[in-house]
Amino acid sequence: MTGLLITIDGPSGLGKSTTVTTTAHALQATGQTVHTATGPSTTPFGAAVRQAAATMRGRALALAVAADRLHQLDTEIRPRRAAGTTVLCDRYLPSTLVLQRADGVDTDFLLAINEGADVPDLSVILTADPDTVQRRLAARGTRHRFERDAAATARELHLYQEAVPVLERLGYRLHTVDTTHLTPEQTAQAILEAVPSGTINTKTPQGS
């Protein structure tokens, strides 16, 4: 069996990392073997891309992100899927179609340099109302230049909406979860319920 690829994207400050962890635990409770990944990757090159994002701009950063993604697919994601492991990835192509577009890179260029990237079995986009996003960012603290102000948050939310038809044309199975009033556990449950029918047992075993 080929393991599933489930990706989780959305504006900064919505707790994607927490959602990935909580969803991984929920999947493990159904008997799945789960591996969590993040983009950029945790390799030395991925770490360099994260650091460079503070100063690198436009096509140069987009190329670095794409190179890391394609390498991560070859060395981390595909081998685990081939072994039957479900892979949960924190940020994937949807984030590229938002953050790199916000950096002035056009969609056609982004799709070209990411050609060959696997289409996920499920692509989750987390969202919330702009005020909620800003409150969560304020509580967490700003970590990079894409989180600088409310206007950037509004732009990011708008670009995710614009990315939806592009991703659908690529064959993405999209599921949007409004996290404004949800706990991480409720968000994870909403993700499990959206997993393609028959691929996993979404009911938690008794006694778990």
Image: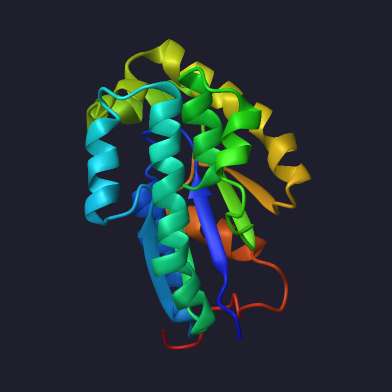
The picture places residue 98, in percent across and down from the top left corner, at 53, 30
| Relative depth, front residue between 106 and 128 | 106
| Relative depth, front residue between 140 and 199 | 199
Q: Residue at x 71, y 36 (%)?
A: 166
Q: Is residue 170 above or below residue 193?
A: above
Q: Residue at x 29, y 49 (%)?
A: 46
| Relative depth, front residue between 195 and 91 | 91
Q: Is residue 54 above or below residue 23?
A: above
The picture places residue 179, in percent across and down from the top left corner, at 50, 41
Q: Residue at x 57, y 34 (%)?
A: 110
What residue occupies the far right of the structure in this picture?
169
Q: Residue at x 61, y 48 (%)?
A: 115
User: Residue 186, can we see it?
Assistant: no
What colouring style does the render use?
rainbow
| Relative depth, front residue between 131 and 63 | 63
The picture places residue 112, in percent across and down from the top left corner, at 62, 39
In-image side of 45 versus 124 (left or right): left
Point out the image quarter for the N terminus: bottom right
Q: How many marks?
A: 0
User: Residue 104, can we see it?
Assistant: yes
The picture places residue 160, in percent across and down from the top left corner, at 59, 31
Point out the image quarter for the C terminus: bottom left
